[in-house]
Image (cartoon, helix red, strand yellow):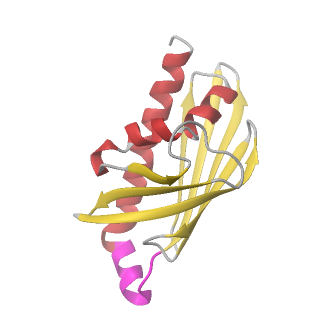
């Protein structure tokens, strides 16, 4: 059960960072390398508490669907999305936003379990954990870029 933690400082107010991170359209733009698109639930704009989105994307050459629900939302501090249906056995993804001088510290904690028991754990060690970490970092860099553009930095 890998837990991936990332952090990124963003030169933008916390409320802007929070909304950019939960914007479906920005998520789609940030994951263009996997052709990710929202096909169910909230498919555009800001997702809110108890709402779902179903993503379709191509990972490792395979088209996959993933449905997540926002299970916690404390504006502008934190929100959590959890997988309801998809390729993982489970995941719990925490997004936190800490106000700092000159900006916001964005913390991301992705706690997941791969399917297929031993083989899933082997895949984690061989490639999946690193793939997911790089995926999250790339997305977070995009969030940073958009949030900072919104405040003219």
Examine the rendered structure and indicate whether residue 52 appears above or below residue 20.
below
Examine the rendered structure and indicate whether residue 108 appears above or below residue 21.
below
Please provide percent x and percent y for residue 110. Answer: 55, 59
Please provide percent x and percent y for residue 5. Answer: 55, 54
Q: Nearer the viewer, residue 40 or 82?
A: 40
Please provide percent x and percent y for residue 121. Answer: 41, 80
**The furthest residue to the right:** 74
Examine the rendered structure and indicate whether residue 2 appears above or below residue 72.
below
Q: Nearer the viewer, residue 50 or 11?
A: 50
Q: Main secondary structure of the magenta part?
A: helix
Instruction: Give the left or right position of residue 139, taking residue 13 as reference.
Output: left
Q: Quadrant of residue 91?
A: bottom right
Q: Nearer the viewer, residue 121 or 84?
A: 84
What residue sits 64% from the left and 35% below the top?
Answer: 18
Please check the rendered image and state whether residue 31 is part of the magenta-colored stretch, yes or no.
Answer: no
What residue sits 38% from the left and 57% below the top?
Answer: 56
**The furthest residue to the top:** 152
Examine the rendered structure and indicate whether residue 33 appears above or below residue 4.
above
What residue sits 49% from the left and 34% below the top?
Answer: 143
Please check the rendered image and state whether residue 115 is part of the magenta-colored stretch, yes or no.
Answer: yes
Q: Nearer the viewer, residue 92 or 19?
A: 19
**The furthest residue to the bottom:** 118
Please provide percent x and percent y for residue 102. Answer: 65, 18
Instruction: Give the left or right position of residue 75, taking residue 151 as reference.
Output: right
Q: Which residues are magenta?
A: 114-125
């Amino acid at each position: 059960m890998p837990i991936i933690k990332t952090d990124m400082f963003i030169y933008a107010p916390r409320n802007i960072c929070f909304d950019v991170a939960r914007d479906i359209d920005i998520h789609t733009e940030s994951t263009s390398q996997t052709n990710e698109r929202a096909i169910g639930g909230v498919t555009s704009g800001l997702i809110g508490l108890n709402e779902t989105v179903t993503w379709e994307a191509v990972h490792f050459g395979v088209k996959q669907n993933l449905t997540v629900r926002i299970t916690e939302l404390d504006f502008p501090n934190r929100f959590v999305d959890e997988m309801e249906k998809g390729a993982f056995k489970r995941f719990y993804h925490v997004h936190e936003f800490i106000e700092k001088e000159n900006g916001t510290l964005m913390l991301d904690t992705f706690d997941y379990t791969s399917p297929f028991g031993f083989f899933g754990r082997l895949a984690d060690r061989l490639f999946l954990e690193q793939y997911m970490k790089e995926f999250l970092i790339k997305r977070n860099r995009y969030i940073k870029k958009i949030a900072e553009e919104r405040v003219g930095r």
